[in-house]
Image (cartoon, rainbow, N blue to C red):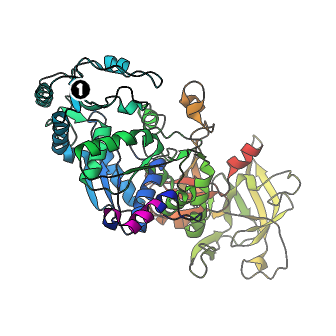
Amino acid sequence: MSTEKGPNFLEEIIEEDIKSGKHGGRVLTRFPPEPNGYLHIGHAKSICLNFGLAKQFGGQTNLRFDDTNPEKEETEYVESIKRDIQWLGFTWANEFYASDYFEQLYGFALELIRKGVAYVDDSTAEEIAAMKGTPTEPGKHSPFRDRSIAENLDLFERMRTGEFRDGERVLRAKIDMASPNMHLRDPLMYRIKHTAHHRTGDAWCIYPMYDFAHGQSDSIERITHSICTLEFAVHRPLYEWFIQQLEIFPSQQYEFARLNLNYTVMSKRRLLQLVKEKIVTGWDDPRMPTISGIRRRGYTPDSIRRFAEMVGVARRENVIDVGMLEFCVREHLNRIATRVMVVLDPIKLVITNYPEGDGEVLQAENNPEVENAGGTREMPFSKELWIERDDFKIIPEKKYFRLAPGLMVRLKHAYIVKCEDYVVDEKGNVTEVRCTYVPESKSGQDTSGINVKGTIHWVSTREAVPCEVRLYDRLFSVEDPSSEEGDFKDYMNPNSLEVIPAAMAEPSLRHAGKDDKFQFIRKGYFCLDADSSAERLVFNRTVPLKDSWAKQKEG
């Protein structure tokens, strides 16, 4: 996954390993999600990094589910994770689960007990926490630390057979209670949980802790480069300690800065809270930073991969502006999206001098960014059209180049029209704009000699397709909702969703597909929503044409 800045530090490490013949020149990475929620954009960066590095150096990537916490893990999450990875364009070499290794991990634990470097502790969670000490004060030895190997083996085997209650005993590694690294102060290896597992059922009632399962799973799979985010840097000495004690394949851990994005939250716990409290419609709500959410909103795999590439790989934490992500999708959609005309707030425009009952079919360019390949589509034109309400003003301000009494504009792909009159209802609201058209001004065949400064979009009323349009914006109104005082939900953007129930679309959109991307001319980029049906089309705005938030911040 090269960036324009040259090789990153992980690429340099791998290049050197291949050059020196380490691991026989092999490159095998892994992506190890816990199936306790849906993946988000931060995971997307990790996916692109792990799979991208392996591909770059002719290696492979394993998908391994870290399913060691049965209370929070579900098959639904497993399936969603696989869909997300495939959508991003990656294929794993092998699909594994930490639960595949439960018997082998149990054997490793027995081996450490026999070596005298693991023991069963009867202390409560509160007592163990109190014995840990502080970063500046050493911890205290457990009264059970010096149990005999025979007693530890007996108790651990009885833990497995289900003789004890949850929390009654744990297995701990015997390392150094005075270590400045708190993770080396006799860390937990196993806890008792009488909870059914989504894959192993009730076969186990003891489950390994992440720090014990992770490195050994890497080693079992002979992972060459175990790439984690920076918060796991302090776990690395423990990762290496277990491997050294067991004398197994020396997988090695490397850390990079996780993706922190402004105007959102990336905590699975908080995202789950938004789902459970029905603040959003689900994990795939288009305002969510989940991969399923941004996919439903209309983001493309290409734009996510480009974003990961632009963010790059760093050793220090930083916060990325969500505007960079929006730039990437806007740049990609500009190249691939079909241009269409949709009127969000319609008022009628009547061309008084157009022949009654007549109509014609005009040719509209699908995408001017695609040279000689964009093609055209048919646009029906008639006497009565829908236009945007804000494209007409009774009293226009200075430099207003749309419709007003006496002013002229071009109708996109069609003719020049001049506003002659308008109709209002009893409340003074404009209900109809009346214009004349210039027959000689047809787009592509204009011989009128008339120049106008404004162009507006339109839809023929006779063929218009009613649809619902959902305008999505950022979920939070502050850059870092997690750091603000009070509940993070207090900082949600009240304008994160505006629903327009009765927009009018050009008839070509009747055949829109779920993977199609559109630019609604002058409005932004849109896609068909999963709620859509043949009877009721629903479109989501992916991003506006321009970054309006940048202007707000400047102001």
Query: In the image, which residues are magenta?
Result: 13-23
Asked if one can make out residue 325 in the rendered structure from this viewpoint, the answer is yes
Q: What residue is rendered at 61% in x and 36% in y? A: 494
Asked if residue 490 lies left or right of residue 228, the reply is right
- Counting from the top left corner in percent of width and height, residue 134 is at 44, 22
The one of 430 and 235 positioned closer to us in this rendering: 235
- Counting from the top left corner in percent of width and height, residue 51 is at 40, 60
The one of 270 and 460 positioned closer to us in this rendering: 270
The one of 484 and 512 positioned closer to us in this rendering: 484
Q: What residue is rendered at 82% in x and 79% in y? A: 448
Q: What number of labels is visible?
A: 1
Is 359 in the magenta? no
Asked if one can make out residue 36 in the rendered structure from this viewpoint, the answer is no
Q: What residue is rendered at 74% in x and 52% in y? A: 390
Q: What residue is rendered at 59% in x and 65% in y? A: 4
Mark 1 secondary-structure assignment: strand
Name the magenta segment's main secondary structure.
helix
Name the residue type under label 1: Val
Residue identifier under label 1: 170
